[in-house]
Image (cartoon, rainbow, N blue to C red):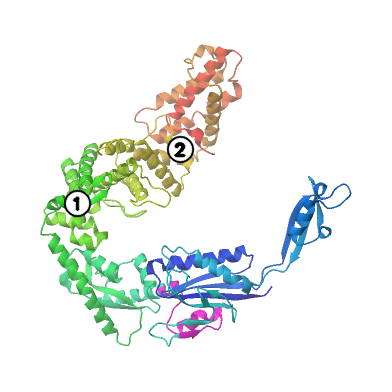
Amino acid sequence: MATNDFLVEIGTEELPPKALHKLMTSLADAIGAGLNKAQLAHGDVEALATPRRLAVIVRDLADAQPEQSIERRGPAVTAAFDADGNPTKAASGFARSCGVDVADLDQMETEKGSWLVYRERKPGEQTVTLIGSIVEAAAASLPIERPMRWGASRAEFVRPVHWIVMLMGKDVVPANLFGLDTGRTSRGHRFMSTGEVSIASPNDYEEALEAHKVIASFEKRRAIIQTQLDTIQAAQAANVVPDAELLDEVTSLVEWPAALCGEFDPAFLDVPEEALISAMKSHQRYFHLRDNAGKLAPAFIAVANIDSRNPASVIAGNERVIVPRLSDASFFFRQDSKSTLESKLERLAHIVFQGKLGSYFDKARRVEALAGDIAEMLSDDIDKARRAGLLCKTDLVTDMVGEFPELQGIMGGYYARVDGEDDAVADAIAEHYLPVQSGGALPVTRAGQIIAIADKLDTLTGLFGIGQPPTGSRDPFALRRQSIGVLRICIECALPLDIVALVNLATTRHDRDFDPAPLIEYLFERLAVSYQEQGIPVDTFNAVRYAGEPVTELTQFDHQVRALQAFRGHDSAEALVAANKRVANILRQADADGLPGISPALFDSDAESGLHAEVNRVKAGIGPDTSYEAQLALLAELRPAIDRYFDDVLVMAEDARVKQNRLATLADMRALFMGVADVSLLQM
C-alpha cells in the first residue's frame, strides 16, 4: 500500500503560552489515536507549535484503509426457516438490514448450532476522505477551558483560526475546518517575513517556515534559547538561574528567539531579591542571573521575538520597561515596612478564609494555638511557635503580596525581621507554606516545620469537618498537596508525632464538633499512594497499617513499612506469609473466639510442644527496645517449627478439647505475628 507524509497546520492568533506545549502534544496524540481507530497505518506522529500555529506531521501515512471484512451473525437456522423451508420474518428482517436477499446469506456452524451470517468484503476508504473528520475531532478534543468564537462563525477554538494547511504528500487534502477551506499557504514571521508561505510538502514544512523566520519545532526553539542563555552567561561571568517552567513559557512566546542581556540599577538590590525576581519573571518573562558569590546580579536576560539590526535599542527598551516594575517592588517594600505585622492582624479579620470557617484572623488564632501544642509535643520553644503561628498570615494584607501573591510567606519573613522579631519566628513565617508543589522543598527550621504542619492541619480538619473534602479533579484548597505536605514533613524531618493525635488536636481547635475519622483515613490513603509511587506495594503498607498494634507515629510507621518491604526478600518470608494465611483462614473458619488458654498437657507430639516453645522463646526475645528488623528476624526463626507443625499435626482433631487447644496454639502464634505486622496480607 502506498504511503505519504501528512501535514496539518492550524494557524491562529497568539495562543496562550502556558498552554501551548500541552495543546501541541494533545493535538498530536488525538490525531494519532484517530488514525489508529480508523485503521490507517502510519509512522511517527510529530508535534510542532509556535505562538501562532499548532501543527502535526504524520510520517508514512497509508493512502487508504486496509480491505474491510464484515461479518454479521443473524438468527439461528432453526428460527430462520419454517417447516416448509420458507424464510421467517426473522430471516427476512435480518437480510433486509444487510441490504441483501435471504438467498444471499451464508450459514455458519458453531458448537451451539447453525446460524445465518452475512459476509462482505469491501475496499477500505481513502485517507483523504477520512482525515478531515479525524483532524476536526482531534481539534475538538483539545483541553480548552474557554473556547472562543469569532466573527459571525459558530466555530470554536482556543483562539480565532485564520488559515488551515492540510497536505498529503504534495497534494492538498480538501476539507473545511473552522469555516475555512484547507490549502498549502501558511504564514511566516509577523514582522520579519513577507507574509504568506507556500508549503510544497510536509517534508519541506520546517525548512520553508525557517526561511521566513519561523522555527516550527518547539524543542528546537527551546534548545536555541538555552544555547543563547549559555553564551550570555559565559560573556557576563555570571550564572543564569535554571528555570524550566520559564524556559518553556518563553519558548511558547517567540517564533524566532533572540536572547539579549540588559541591566538595572544596583540600588534596587536593597529590595528582597524574591520581589525583584518575581517582577522580572512573572511580569516580563526575564531570566535573572547570580554572580559567582551566589548573589543576585543587577542584570537580566530577555528573549525577543525579533532579530533586530539594532539590538542595543531593544535592550534599552527592555531596561526602560523593567524600571517601573522594580520601582513598584521597592515602593511596596518601603510602605509595608512602615507598620508591623502585628498591627496588620486586625485587617486579617476582614478577609474571609472560608465562609463556614471564619476569617484569616480566626485561622491565625487556631494556628497559633495548634502550633503551641505541637511545639510542646516536640519539647520545642512554645512561645516562638505561637508567635509565628499568629503572624504567619499577616503578609496577605501587604501591598507587596497583593501585587506578587506568589511571595506570601516569603515577604512575611522579611517583614518580621524588619519588625525585630526573633529569627526563628521570621524563618517559620517564611517557610510555613512549604512544600508548595509535589516533591518540593520542605521547611528547614523546626519552627517552620511546626507552623507548616499546624497551618495545613487547620485547613484539612476545617474543610473535612464541613464536608468539603477533595472530589475528583476539584480541590480548590489544594488539600491533596497539603495532606502530603503534612506526611512528608513528619516523616522526612523525623518528627516524632502521632498523626491521629495531631488530627484529633487540630479538630478541637475549631469552634464546632468535627469527626476526625474521615480525615485520618484520607491521610493514610494518601500515604499508601505515596509509597506506591516509591515502589512499595499497598500490601506491604496494609500489613503494617492493620497490625494488631497499629502504629500512628509516622516516622516509626515509615521505618516499619520500609523494613517489612526489605524483609519480603528474606528466604523464609514466602513460607511465613503462606503459614499466616493458612492460620488466619483456619481461625476464621473455626470461629475461634473465646478460646481457652493453652494446655501443654494436651500436646501429643514434639511438633506441638516445639512450636509452643519456639513461640514463647521469640516472645521473650521481643522487648520494648527490640528493633523492628530484629523482631522480623526473630519471626523468621519460627519457620522450621511452623513447617513441622503443619506436617505432623491435624489441627481439627476429633477430640474437641484437643482441637480447641491446637486452635489456641495457632491463635497465640498469630497474635505474635500481628504484634509486628499482619503478614497474611502480603501477596507473595
Q: Quadrant of the C terminus?
A: top right
Identify the residue position indicated by label 2 in the image: 542
Instruction: Categorize mark 1 by other alpha carbons within 10 Å: few (<14), some (14-19), many (20+).
Output: few
The circle drawn on residue 350 is: 1
Q: Is residue 587 above or below residue 506?
A: above
**Is residue 203 inside the magenta stretch?**
yes
- Front position in the image: 624 or 344: 344
Q: What's the amino acid at mark 1?
A: His
The percent position of residue 255, horizontal first and vertical second, equals: 40, 78
User: Of callouts 1 and 2, which one flags the residue occurring earlier in the amino acid sequence?
Assistant: 1
The percent position of residue 155, horizontal first and vertical second, equals: 48, 70
**Is residue 161 inside the magenta stretch?**
no
Q: Is residue 231 above or below residue 483?
A: below
Residue depicted at 53% across the width and 16% down the height = 660
Q: Quadrant of residue 466?
A: top left
Q: Secondary structure at mark 2?
A: helix
Q: What's the amino acid at mark 2?
A: Asn
The circle drawn on residue 303 is: none
Q: Which residues are magenta?
A: 196-221
- Front position in the image: 274 or 70: 70
Q: Is residue 300 left or right of residue 597?
A: left
Q: Secondary structure at mark 1?
A: loop
Q: Is residue 494 visible?
A: no
Q: Is residue 478 visible?
A: yes
Residue depicted at 79% across the width and 53% down the height = 91
- Front position in the image: 611 or 175: 175
